Amino acid sequence: MPDQQKIWDHFQNEGVDSFSQSQGRLEFLTRRLQPGTRALNIGIGNGALERMAAGKGVDIWCLDPSERAIEGLRQELDLGEKAQVGFCQAMPFPDEHFDVVIMSEVLEHLDDGLFEETLAEVKRVLRPGARFIGTVPARENLMNAVVVCPHCGIQFHRWGHKRSFSIVTLVAALSKYLLVESASERFFIDWGMVSWWGKIQGLIKKFLSWRGIGTYGTNRNIFFSAIKPHSLAYHE
């Protein structure tokens, strides 16, 4: 398997335009943040969510393994120690520190061990009653995005995805650590980035999404929201 961290570091720096289609999804998530809320975003992408949240008066913090991406955002938004280089399975933050933790298009990158460790860390840094929100690709066929290195012949997912989710499998996984309050499939589009024909297609897809109709695995995401229970005795 190639070094996926190097691949992701490339997309977050030299290949930052790869995140240009994420605006609609990130705006959707930002609307769920209240001014004054202490929120942690894990996996910063191009920094769009941090910019929108800061502009809304959210106390935004962020975590990402890319030192270059974190340093750039730290300087741009004057985040100081609120912007940290690190990994989601070992967060450099205190217990019960955040009102919201956000992970959008991140969980699918984690293998089984890291996935479980990450959810345990999310629960640790959330305050009781606080929320974990985010998105993952819906019912992705991982084989459709497999590419081959022309030099060594190794096959790998072009974005480094390790797992695919349905609503059922995602809820089951999250429920081991948190109380899931909602999970639903959504279709996101950045209206400012598409032509008039793209807008028409987007409206049709939005309508079909609202009606629960659509092509499996075609640009759909699962939005989830889960709460850290107040009771320490909670067990799934």
Image (cartoon, rainbow, N blue to C red):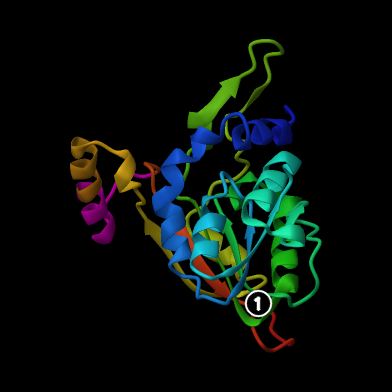
Q: Residue at x 63, y 34 (%)?
A: 13
Q: Residue at x 67, y 71 (%)?
A: 177
Q: Between 126 and 139, which is closer to the camera in this rendering?
A: 126
Left of 105 or right of it: where is 94?
Answer: right
Could you tell me residue 65's position as x and y percent?
74, 45
Q: Which residue is mark 1?
A: 236
Locate the C terminus and report the quarter of the image it occupies.
bottom right
Q: Is residue 136 visible?
A: yes
Give the magenta part as a residue range.
204-216
Q: Residue at x 22, y 43 (%)?
A: 199
Q: Is residue 111 visible?
A: no
Question: How crowded is the residue under tag 1: few (<14 C-alpha within 10 Å), some, or many (20+)?
Answer: few
Could you tell me residue 95's position as x and y percent?
79, 75
Would residue 179 be counted in the magenta stretch? no
In the picture shown, does residue 13 fall above or below 84? above
SS category of the residue bearing label 1: loop
Left of 88 or right of it: where is 164?
Answer: left
Would residue 205 be counted in the magenta stretch? yes
Locate the N terminus and report the quarter of the image it occupies.
top right
Q: Between 13 and 165, which is closer to the camera in this rendering?
A: 13
Could you tell me residue 39's position as x and y percent?
61, 69
Q: Residue at x 69, y 84 (%)?
A: 234
Q: Between 140 and 62, which is closer to the camera in this rendering?
A: 62
